[in-house]
Image (cartoon, helix red, strand yellow):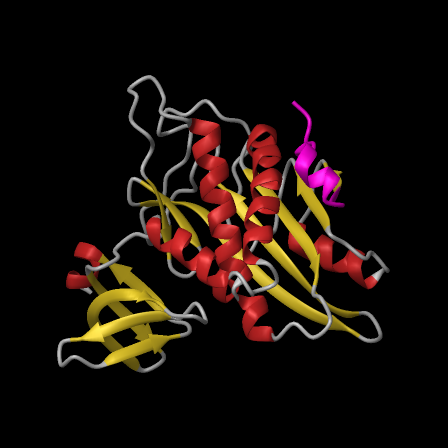
Amino acid sequence: MTFVLDPAAIAAGYRIEVHDSLGSTSTQALERARAGEAGPLWVVTREQTGGRGRRGKGWGWIAGNHAASLLWPVPPGLAPDRVATLGFVAGIAVERALRRACGPGTTGVAPDFRLKWPNDVLLGGAKLVGILLEMETLPGRGAFVTVGIGVNVAGAPDGLPYAATSLAEAGHAVDAPGLFRLLTGAWVEAERLWDEGRGFLRIRDAWLAAAVGLGGPVSVQTGARAMTGTFETIDEGGRLVVRLADGERVAISAGEVHFGTAATAA
């Protein structure tokens, strides 16, 4: 199969750029913006040799996996805190695309895809998808966001400090081009629901419905501070809200997060 956009994405004005090999789809997308590309543009590659994750961590590559980035022009006047909530839009879009790609399978039971704050998708409690947002302002051009989405379709890298899995390992016969097409259509749906941040409460409700660990134990490391409590919700800015043992509610913007038994062991 070849990489193509969903018809809904084409109708909404999205375009696609396909490569055989790239260091990073997000780097390529930003380079295209610096060269005058207006977006929205999906950059996708069949091989990614220098993918990156949060906090500068690398994103390992296995042939057959999914690597794509969306170059998205920020509308004038849209506040940075609203732009940051695009990560939840991406999570919803990926989760919906995965469900459509995998279906209930031969067992009739839907796969256990879950969203992990702030920007991962899990399958059976193991990491399947990483999402990375980056923003750059270009003089005279405004701001652009890249939404990088890596999915372990064919395999998961070894030697990671956390559990990871792939669609193939879970028995789902999905390929990267097919998943990409579904993702581009699901993105259009989720972005319209988001409505430049005005509809974030609807996105938040959808995200919470698929969230891992909601109502259970959570541990968070933010800089020098470590805290343990209950994952209560995410707030109107997308921050993780933790209720501590003494009843204090703390809103977390960024940190290393563990849920469930991993939280109690942390």
The quadrant in which residue 250 appears is: bottom left
- Tell me the quadrant of the picture where the N terminus can be found: top right
Magenta stretch containing residue 89, yes or no? Answer: no
Q: Is residue 204 left or right of residue 51?
A: left
Q: Is residue 30 left or right of residue 68?
A: right
At which x and y percent is residue 42?
Answer: 70, 46
At which x and y percent is residue 194?
Answer: 55, 57
Taking 100 as reference, is 265 above or below it?
A: below
The quadrant in which residue 9 appears is: top right
At which x and y percent is residue 26?
Answer: 65, 55
Residue located 41% across and 35% down the image: 166
Residue located 82% across and 70% down the image: 141
Q: Is residue 24 visible?
A: no
Q: Main secondary structure of the magenta part?
A: loop
At which x and y percent is residue 219?
Answer: 24, 68
- Tell me the quadrant of the picture where the C terminus can be found: bottom left
Residue located 59% across and 43% down the image: 67
Q: Is residue 138 visible?
A: yes
> What residue occupies the far top of the structure in this picture?
106
Count all numbered tags in the image, as a single digit. 0
Query: Which region of the structure is painted magenta?
Result: 1-15
Q: Nearer the viewer, residue 210 or 66?
A: 210
